[in-house]
């Protein structure tokens, strides 16, 4: 029997204004008619515009349909046709929620409708809101449990702030929509996940939470939203890892597409409708939402291995086999969008921080992906352009290519943070290192990383050190926050270390964390749930207040 037609996702909300909001959903057919029905008894209708995603593919490493092992169905990247539908619902009144559902009609006349959800326009200043702070989902094991516990603990949230790394490989369609292990991006945030976890022989299936059907989501670009050179490698994983500096691409690929031969965020930008800046488009922007002015920056670089093995293309060196082939170099942890003083993004940020919208906002918040302060591994080396050092023998042959990252040239600490401090920013939110920890500057600016939603790689604390080059303690810090702040001990219920003493972080592959910003009280609360104990309570373990 032919299965009944399905929507690929439930609808979700994007780009609210004071009297409108966008409704977006996806299907695997273009449809002869795609509509949103809304209002009392769903009597009003608006038609959607439809576009086709241009780069979504599956490959030998996908887990989709009947492919549960590498290469069962796909032996190489294959185009997957997916259509995006977007309709703008207008005439809304702030503070009034409205029922809606979407419907897509196939070319053969068969229609598919979603369940009924609620939408609303952008809230007025003074409206108390609960905002979910999250990042680094990446189909990780605890993500569905995390999102399910959000809804069970706090109910419906009013918005989602997502600090990057939504999936692993952005052009792999199934990671967004229907990975058959049950943890794809949209199902998790829409309560349609089917992720099974097992502890002590007991299996529990987590479904995520119905969140973005009712609440708009504002995202920023992390390193996992960026694809590398197009179709140059045999798998999508290899293509993702093949990002290449624009300057080097201009020299090597003169006359060819710079986007296709360096790096791109095409799929990410095609999927989401976000606020846009004139200078940065969707890549960096600012938006007012209730009492908050949220500034979203494009601060991320290519993650490369910290290993010092000469066979590895890493943070600190090129692989020995590629020394004489610069087209295969990685160029270290390249930065995708300049943020140093004088850059286009920096100048835009400086202007935004001085704008009436930012200055007059009750809460001034900045979100980006790369950490300014963390106990995680990914803050080392410094966030700066790699300094390339080529060693040659007497005959001129290349013996080694290595990279240094002077700590005093860290663009976030040297250039961005002083701007944020001067503008009296209260709160900086980020991700990347897959743990929970927070910090406060001497001026009272709060820093929160709450990215331990699905797994963790540990914290550089106590006896555990980061993997860093030997002999350069000035530039490569093995333990603690390299940028000089002490982590804050959770204020309510910190976890205990092996010595029985409280620890200032959560870095666990069993305990998942989420955070909620309550604009009514100005508090940011963090919660943890131990997936080893499915019947246990969610515990609020930390809370701080923005002033």
Image: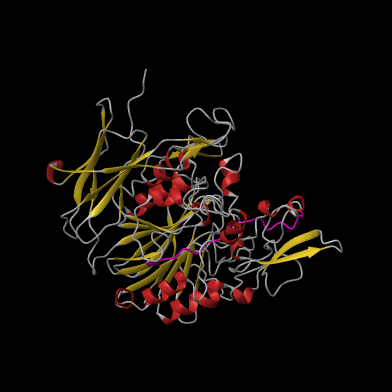
Quadrant of the image containing the N terminus: top left
Q: Residue at x 54, y 53 (%)?
A: 255
Residue situated in front as seen by the camera: 415 or 146: 415
Magenta span has 306? yes
Q: Main secondary structure of the magenta part?
A: loop
**10 relative to 409, above or below:** above
Query: How far from the left and from the top, in percent, is residue 449?
Result: 49, 63
Q: Residue at x 65, y 73 (%)?
A: 406
Residue situated in front as seen by the camera: 407 or 205: 407
Total numbered labels placed on residues in the image: 0
Query: How far from the left and from the top, in percent, is residue 339?
Result: 50, 70
Residue located farthest toward the right when viewing the structure as drawn: 394
Range of residues picked out in magenta: 295-310
Residue situated in front as seen by the camera: 192 or 303: 303
Residue located farthest toward the top when viewing the structure as drawn: 1
Q: Residue at x 55, y 71 (%)?
A: 487
Query: How far from the left and from the top, in percent, is residue 197?
Result: 51, 40
**293 relative to 94, above or below:** below
Left or right: residue 39 versus residue 367 is left
Residue situated in front as seen by the camera: 278 or 437: 278
**Residue 536 makes an appearance in the image:** no
**Residue 254 makes an appearance in the image:** yes
Left or right: residue 284 versus residue 288 is right
Query: How far from the left and from the top, in percent, is residue 373?
Result: 54, 69
Quadrant of the image containing the C terminus: bottom left
């Amino acid at each position: 029997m032919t299965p009944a037609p399905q929507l690929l996702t439930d609808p979700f909300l994007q780009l609210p204004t004071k009297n409108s909001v966008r409704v977006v959903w996806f299907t695997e057919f273009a449809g002869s008619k795609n509509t949103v029905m809304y209002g009392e008894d769903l009597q009003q209708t608006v038609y959607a515009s439809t576009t086709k995603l241009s780069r979504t593919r599956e490959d030998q490493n996908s887990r989709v349909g009947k492919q549960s092992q590498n290469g069962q169905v796909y032996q190489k990247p294959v185009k997957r046709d997916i259509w995006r539908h977007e309709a703008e619902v207008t005439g809304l009144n702030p503070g009034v929620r409205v029922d809606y559902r979407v419907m897509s009609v196939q070319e053969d006349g068969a229609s598919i409708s979603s369940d009924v959800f609620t939408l609303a326009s952008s809230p007025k200043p003074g409206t108390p809101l609960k905002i979910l702070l999250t990042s680094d989902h990446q189909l990780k094991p605890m993500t569905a449990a995390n999102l399910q516990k959000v809804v069970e603990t706090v109910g419906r949230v009013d918005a989602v702030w997502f600090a990057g790394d939504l999936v692993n490989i952005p052009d792999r369609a199934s990671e967004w929509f229907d990975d058959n292990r049950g943890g794809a991006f949209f199902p998790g945030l829409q309560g349609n996940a089917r992720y099974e976890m097992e502890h002590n022989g007991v299996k529990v299936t987590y479904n995520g939470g119905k969140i973005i059907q009712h609440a708009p989501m504002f995202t920023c670009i992390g390193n996992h939203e960026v694809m590398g050179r197009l179709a140059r490698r045999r798998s999508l994983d290899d293509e993702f890892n093949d990002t290449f500096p624009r300057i080097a691409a201009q020299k090597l690929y003169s006359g060819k597409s710079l986007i296709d031969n360096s790096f791109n965020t095409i799929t990410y930008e095609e999927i989401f409708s976000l606020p846009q800046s004139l200078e940065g488009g969707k890549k960096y922007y600012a938006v007012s939402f209730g009492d908050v002015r949220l500034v979203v920056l494009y601060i991320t670089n290519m993650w490369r291995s910290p290993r010092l093995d000469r066979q590895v293309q890493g943070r600190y060196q090129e692989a020995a086999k590629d020394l004489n082939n610069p087209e295969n170099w990685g160029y270290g942890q390249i930065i995708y969008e300049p943020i140093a003083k004088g850059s286009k993004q920096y100048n835009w940020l400086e202007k935004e921080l001085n704008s009436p919208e930012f200055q007059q906002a009750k809460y001034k918040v900045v979100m980006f992906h790369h950490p300014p302060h963390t106990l995680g591994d990914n803050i080392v080396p410094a966030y700066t352009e790699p300094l390339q050092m080529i060693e040659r023998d007497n005959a001129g042959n290349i013996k080694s290519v290595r990279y240094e990252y002077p700590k005093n040239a860290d663009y976030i600490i040297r250039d961005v943070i002083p701007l944020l401090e001067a503008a009296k920013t209260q709160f900086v939110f980020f991700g990347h290192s897959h743990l929970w920890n927070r910090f406060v500057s001497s001026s009272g600016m709060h820093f929160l990383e709450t990215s331990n939603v699905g797994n963790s790689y540990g914290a550089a604390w106590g006896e555990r050190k980061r993997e860093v080059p030997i002999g350069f303690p000035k530039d490569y810090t093995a333990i603690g926050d390299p940028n000089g702040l002490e982590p804050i001990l959770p204020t309510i219920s910190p976890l205990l270390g092996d010595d029985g003493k409280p620890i200032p972080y959560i870095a666990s592959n069993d305990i998942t964390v989420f955070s909620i910003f309550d604009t009514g009280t100005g508090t940011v609360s963090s919660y943890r749930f131990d997936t080893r104990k499915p019947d246990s309570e969610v515990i609020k373990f930390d809370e701080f207040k923005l002033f």
